[in-house]
Image (tube, helix red, strand yellow):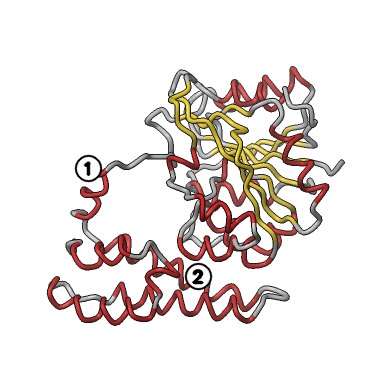
Amino acid sequence: MPSVSVALCTRNGAPYVRSQLDSMLAQSVAQHEWIVSDDDSRDATIEVVSGVADAAGQPVRILRNDPPLGVTANFEQALAATTGELIALSDQDDVWHPEKLARMVAEFEARPGLLLLASDARLVDGEGEPTGELLLDTLYVSAGERARIHDGDAWGVQLRRNVLTGATMLLRRELLELARPFPASWVHDEWLATIAAATGEVDVLEEPLIDYRQHGGNQIGAESLGWAGRMRRLREPRDARNARLLARAEALAERLPELPGIAPDRVAAAADKLAHERVRSALPEARWRRVGPVLREWRTGRYGRFGLGAQDILRDLVQPVG
């Protein structure tokens, strides 16, 4: 069986981290090591981690950041310190189901080309009680998107939007070597999933293998948006979001040509996505003046290929400038 490292990031996680560690110890697959990267916790997080690991005889290495690095850089640091053949990402406030690692490791053993595997998750509240929702449903991952991933087209899905969540991921070490360094404009799990989809095989298990805790203090969480939430987003200024999307497209278009064996059509797709985000970022402030550029961009088909189609068209037409 391949060795499995866990990359766990913490920040003031004392109320929840013991439950996560206990669920890791309860796995039928032993973990080669825990790498815990702590982002300047001011509570008892480190003491809890050390105590649980010592009591269980679990190898652990704790990295301390002062000042804090932020989510993406913190996870990159934790991942870089691992030595296992497979690496599981872990948040501090979730709970793994007992069969999580066994179920996922078996997929990697059976599929040599698999670079990254994610799963569904059961959403729970701060007390660990199920909310009745599953993560993939909350993220509106459609049956079509799931089928495309299963059929080997995770790249096409990732070009439109990220649908995979880091807390559910297990990845092969080779992916980490391709993905580092992580661009500051990307969230770590989105970048890993996109590079994996560009260079190898990605899949998702449509079964909940963790409890994904939503308690209001999550640095990154899952939010189910109804119509009211979607209308609220249409009223939000567009500047920051479009600047972020452009920076991400620039980073991807710059990195892909550097990857060994990357298919030329994927390099071309990243360049085309960058052109799309440049058009969107350059739209004028006056809404009536956006109609022509948006219509021309719609005719290229890039709104559907690189975004959410009509939803993004509406955003570009009506969102105010900050």
Q: Position of residue 179 (x, y in %)?
A: 63, 62
Q: Residue at x 30, y 60 (%)?
A: 311
Relative side of 106 to 284, left or right:
right
The quarter of the image holding the C terminus is bottom left
Left or right of 271 in this view: 105: right
Q: Nearer the viewer, residue 138 or 212?
A: 138
Q: Which residue is mark 2?
A: 251
* SS for callout 2: helix
- To which quarter of the image does residue 261 belong? bottom right
Q: Position of residue 71 (x, y in %)?
A: 50, 46
Q: What residue sits 55% from the left and 58% below the top?
A: 191
Q: Secondary structure at mark 1?
A: helix
Q: Position of residue 7 (x, y in %)?
A: 65, 41
Instruction: Please report whichever mark, 1 or 2, sits nearer to the chain's N-terminal start.
Output: 1
- Image quarter of residue 152: bottom right
Q: Residue at x 66, y 56 (%)?
A: 202
Report the disc number at residue 228: 1
x then y, percent, for residue 51:
67, 19
Against 133, is 278 above or below? Answer: below
